[in-house]
Structures are given as C-alpha cells and as structure tokens.
Image (cartoon, rainbow, N blue to C red):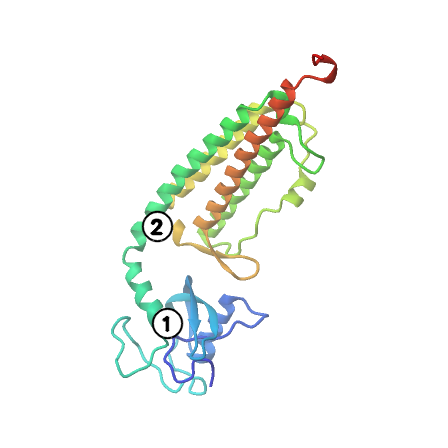
Amino acid sequence: MGPFDGEWTIPVLQVPAHLTAEETLEAIFSETLSVDVTQYEFFDTLYLNDKSGDRFVGNIFTCSDWSGEIQFDKARYSDAGWVTPGNEPREIQVNESIRVWINGAIMDSCQDIGTRAHSVDSMIREMATSRRALLEAFNDLPVYARYDSESAENLSPVQRLICLADQEYYLFSQFIKLLSGSETIWRPFNENQWRDMRDFSKVVGTRENDLLVLNTLVDIRNKLETLLSDHEETISTVWAVDTTGIPINLIDLLGEFILGEKKIATSFKIFGSQSELTEHTPSAHNRKS
C-alpha cells in the first residue's frame, strides 16, 4: 500500500530526516532490490502526482554499476521488470508523471553532451565580459572613493574586490576537489568568517594596493577559466550536494558567482555616481545668494 498503489513506478523510498538523498538511494538498492550500488550520480528532479492529486518531489539518480543479483522486495512491490523507455507494454499502468518524465529525459539526453559543452563555452565568455565590466566600474571610481564605505558594516570597493578574489580562489579550490572526487559536499563561502580572518590594516587607505588587487583578480580568473577549459567535457555533468543534501551542478554554482560579480559592478557604478555628485555639490558658504 502507498500513494502509488496499483501503478508501476521506478524504485522509490521517502528520504528520512536523518539520511541524505545518497544514503536513501543506497537503502533503496540494498533493502528493496537486494544489491549494493557502487557507482551512481544525480540526474534530475522529478515531480510526481498520485491518483488523488497529491504532489511529491523526488531526486532521480542513474546507476551504472552494482554488485549482487537484483531481486525485488515482495513486501513492497507485487511485481518488477526491465522496461525500455518508450516501449512499455500497453497492459501495464505506469504512473503518468513517471512515464512522461522517462520519455522526455531519455530523448533529451541524446543532445545533452553537445548542449553542456556549449554552455561551458558560453559561461567562459560571460565570465570574461563580467570581469571586464567589474574592473571598468572600479577604475571609474575616484581614487578616494575606492577606500570609502557607507558604514562600518559595509566593505569599501577595494575591500569588496579583495573579498571577491578570495571567494573566487575558494570556488577554484573547491571545484578541483569536486572534479577529482575527493569532495562531494558543497559548502558555501562564508563572508562573516572571512571578515573575522582578514586583516585590512595593510590595504585600507593605501592607494598602491590597487594594482595588486586588480592583478590578483586577473590571476584567479585566468586559473578558473583554464580549469573550465580543461574539463569542458565533464564539468557540467559533475554534481555536488549542499549541506542539506540537495544536489547542485557546478555550472549553476559558477552562474551564481558571476551574478554576484555583476551586482558588485552595478554597486560600484551607483557609488561612483553618488561620490561624483557629492564632490560637485557646493557647500553652503560657497553658494550664491
């Protein structure tokens, strides 16, 4: 008995609060199929509707290797079998959400590799455009404004660039670990911890540091673009999971970083306009009566 009682589905198990999606997947194989999975990866998110219209959200994984002989759990399922997507026997009743997803996912996968490679190439071009706009916005700031901040809680433009460079170095190092398989969990950059560790005494108010900061940004961007180019065929197929167990694609992580960079460039332009307005606004005793 269950929400899909009487329908054919793919092996499914609700994720307990104390397990991750991956641990639940391994439980599906061991408890319901009597095998130990040795190689799998996240593939997609599926939204299922049962007969009553209730909606469920599921993570789909593909498995390419396992040990043992598959045997279905008769306490959970009344029957089981292998089916080629698109060629399901007419006499069986497949859950409609699963049927639509399987047919669409399999057909789309034929074009997936070329699309992913194109997305990596597009991302590299967008990275170059975004970084160029950021540096132009910073260089347009008056020198004195580069070390000013609106409040003690806010970073000055120079400090913001230092933070961005350190964040990109963190992104670069984490990508290397995720691509090598030595790490599978994505832990976001923590700016509050970064602020506690960073010493700004050598950069605040020191104009000579501008060039050093800009060169650091150029250096890490070159390294990140090289990493993407070297792994163009695979980087968009690599997935991590966040600390709550939700799958995240590396290209999506990079897209979020680039979006943040664009927002910084926009803030520089606004800050520059405000600084320029303040500089040209006459004081009260200089105004003509």
x then y, percent, for residue 36? 43, 73
Q: Residue furthest right?
A: 285
Q: Nearer the viewer, residue 6 or 72?
A: 6
Quadrant into which the C terminus falls? top right
Contact flag, marks 2 and 1 (Cβ < 8 Å)? no
Asked which quadrant contains residue 121, the reply is top left
* Residue with the mark numbered 2: 116
Q: Residue at x 49, y 66 (%)?
A: 22
Number of labels in the image equals 2
Q: Nearer the viewer, residue 69 or 247?
A: 247
Residue flagged by tag 2: what amino acid is it?
A: Arg
Q: Residue at x 39, y 51 (%)?
A: 236
x then y, percent, for residue 45? 43, 63
* Residue with the mark numbered 1: 98
Q: Is residue 249 above or below residue 149?
A: below
Specify the label residue 287 is tagged with.
none
x then y, percent, for residue 40? 41, 64
